Amino acid sequence: MALHALRKGQAVWFDDGRIGAVVGGHRGAAVDLRITSARSGGDWLAGDKGINLPETTLELPALTAMDEAGLETVVRIADLVGLSFVQSARDVRQLRERLAALGAGAMGIVLKIETRRGFENLPEILFAALEAPAAGVMIARGDLAVECGWERLAEVQEEILWACEAAHVPVVWATQVLETLAKTGRPSRAEITDAAMGGRAECVMLNKGPYIEDAIRALDDIVRRMQTHQAKKRPLLRALRSW
């Protein structure tokens, strides 16, 4: 279904934007792609890598048959459920209807905003989320950067934080937070600043790595320090004691 929705000239990105292509046309059930972005010496595309179609409207159901079956287990063992690739308020309501049918209408939901369409429809998605007893939003910044463009990511994540605060919906700050530290034991300067931004959300997600305990301790220290300067979107203007 996704291949049929592609139109000539639309962008296709592979592996978190590492390889870019443009649709050249359809050939039966196949699609011809012209590679437009890759390393100069060529690139390898391994299996099970993500594909982003930022300019294509996909009329896909929010829940697949596998999702429907998985929810039966989720409602028995979990406190909340995450919904990936939320595109519209209809997706949120479909999940809530399924949870209600399983007797778990009060279960918490986390809506992952990771597509351009999801970002554009964020206001109506938030209104649908407010109908639930407990709901939050995850800013999935890896896919958002590919979908909306790297140069727009700072603005997009900022606007999501503003909108969610206005709606009193908690936010999860996600994707590669302190990843270099978690994997190698040494952080980069850029990711320290990125982690500090996470203090304006209610929760920060870390990925696993051999130094994950160091990453947790560093994140706790960074966020505690920054929260003396700013609470959500409100600067506190506390007295400076560094000099």
Image: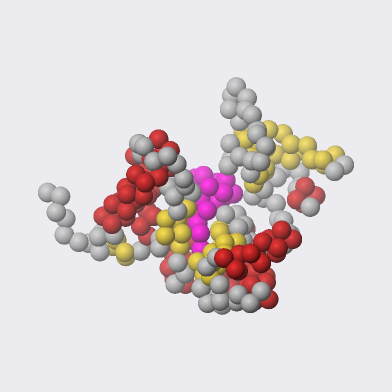
**Residue at figure coordinates x 60%, y 68% from the top left:** 76
Residue beneath the point at 53% across and 70% down: 108
**Residue that lies at the very extreme toward the top in this rendered image:** 41
The image shows residue 42 at horizontal and vertical percentages of 63, 25
- At a point 12% along the width and 49% down the height, the residue shown is 243
Q: How was this image coloured?
A: secondary structure
Residue farthest to the left, as pictured: 243
On whether residue 139 falls in the magenta region, the answer is: yes
Q: Is residue 190 left or right of residue 54?
A: left
Task: Give residue 100's quadrant in the image.
Answer: bottom right
**209 up-or-down from 219: above or below:** above
Whether residue 46 is visible: yes
Q: Quadrant of residue 78?
A: bottom right
In this view, the residue in front, 59 or 49, is 49
Measuring from the top left, give residue 204's x and y in whole percent. 42, 55
Q: Position of residue 38 (x, y in %)?
A: 61, 30
Q: Which residue is most to the right?
A: 28
Q: Is residue 235 or residue 112 the one in the foreground?
A: 112
Relative to 119, does residue 75 appear above or below in the rendering? below
The reply, left or right, for residue 122 in relation to residue 53 is left
Q: Residue at x 50, y 66 (%)?
A: 136
Q: Main secondary structure of the magenta part?
A: helix
Give the quadrant of residue 98: bottom right
Magenta stretch holds residue 45: no
Considering depth in this image, is 46 or 211 the residue closer to the camera?
Answer: 211
Residue 155 is at least partly visible in this image: no
**Horizontal and vertical percent position of residue 213:** 37, 46
Q: How many marks?
A: 0
Report the magenta residues as a range: 137-152
